[in-house]
Amino acid sequence: MAESVLTATPTAQESNPYVTAQRQFDQAASILGLDAGLRQVLREVRRELTVNFPVRMDDGRIRIFTGYRVQHNLTRGPAKGGIRYHPQVSLDEVKALAMWMSWKCAVTNLPYGGAKGGVICDPSELSPGELEHMTRRFASEISILIGPESDIPAPDVNTNQQIMAWIMDTISMEKGYSVPATVTGKPLSIGGSEGRPAATGRGVMVVTKEACRRLGIDPAEATVAVQGFGNVGSVTASLLHQEGFRVVAVSDVFGGIYNPEGLDLPELLEHARAKGRVQGFAGSRQEISNADLLELPVTILIPAALENQLTMANAGRVKARLVVEAANGPTTPEADDIFDQRGVVLVPDILANAGGVTVSYFEWVQDLQSFFWEEGEINSRLSRIMELAYEQTDALAQEHHATLRMGAYCLAVKRVADATAARGIYP
């Protein structure tokens, strides 16, 4: 299911996600009093690979695609990060996402560094055969970087289990034997993990409940708006509905729907699967735009689409008391400042959506051991890790009189900085 498009026009500085990622790091580094040398090391990515590769299309034409794989940091373990297919993919976006992955893994204390990849394309314009050929060729191009001990890709925007299966098979064919731990987010039949498809949304649900508990928000009295009804947004909305929250608005790339009395999530999921969009749902009172959804009078706002959704242009009109970032980088630093001044609590992406990489870690461990866990055990382990990460983030935020974002950054950056200092600079 498609993700939401940009809804608020950011400034030139706000629009570059890598500038945003570096500004967030710089702020945390200043709070921590980080050594100048470590700052230089950690604010830049370690490797950035750009590939331009040919694919033969169904009509016989040759088309050149551009793709990226970026590794930000490898100090704490192999690099980990998704691959996205989207027309707006850029090198700076991928660099920002790789940096955010380093902090996300460190917040949850996973033994990984951060990476990210992407291909500039609109997968909806490709036939199944063209999509497979492009995926396999891209996997071959970045095979010099990826592998179970070095860099483990996963699904992201517009990629899924099938695409991970093609990548795993391509690398396995080149190795001459099956390497299931090359990627995570695979189908169960080839080494995937129970609980992985819903992991990111489940993690968002867990931290949302924890935030509400700490803020004294009763789920039965809380209303929720979810921007983006792809895998993450739909799972988040469904799980919150099951936990007693009233989900009143959702949106996708085509627009949104709103019913202040609440939406029937099981029926909405069936409608979205059948129609390919949320608009037209019989249980909606009103059709709205993505921009409208962000400013609805709700208790909790969950941006689960793309970057730069909440900016200085619209942050002052957001009415939610709590914002939980299910997407990567949906809030610019300028919007962060506005929320802080207005008393809006924001649970940052590097904490809120870390459920996906946490269960990806579980999948990787299971593949390496050839020993698999039951879904109940996976969900229980995930909840414990997310709750502990929230507790540690909140403690540091209070210690430094900072926002939850800076609490999470201080937790993550210190862990990576300590590991970097312990290992030293080679040679």
Image (spheres, rainbow, N blue to C red):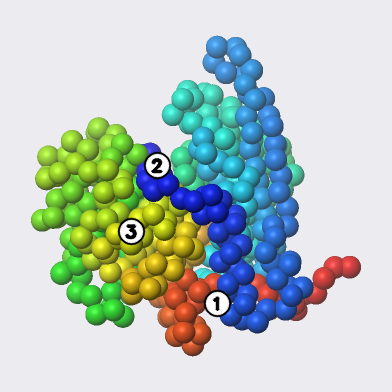
Residue drawn at x 70%, y 60% as measured from the top left: 44
- Mark 2 closeness class: few <14, some 14–19, many ≥20 residues within 10 Å: some
**Picture quarter with the N terminus:** top left
Q: Distance between the residues labelled 3 and 2?
A: 15 Å
Residue drawn at x 34%, y 48% as measured from the top left: 228
Residue type beneath disc 2? Val
Dot placed on the residue nearer the N-terminal end, 1 or 2: 2
Residue type beneath disc 3? Ile
- Label placed on residue 302: 3
**Picture quarter with the C terminus:** bottom right
Give percent across and percent down for residue 326.
Answer: 40, 58
- Label placed on residue 5: 2
Residue type beneath disc 1? Leu
Q: Distance between the residues labelled 1 and 2?
A: 31 Å
- Mark 1 closeness class: few <14, some 14–19, many ≥20 residues within 10 Å: many
Q: Report the residue marked by disc 1.
A: 411
Outermost residue toward the bottom?
Answer: 399
Q: Distance between the residues labelled 1 and 3?
A: 23 Å
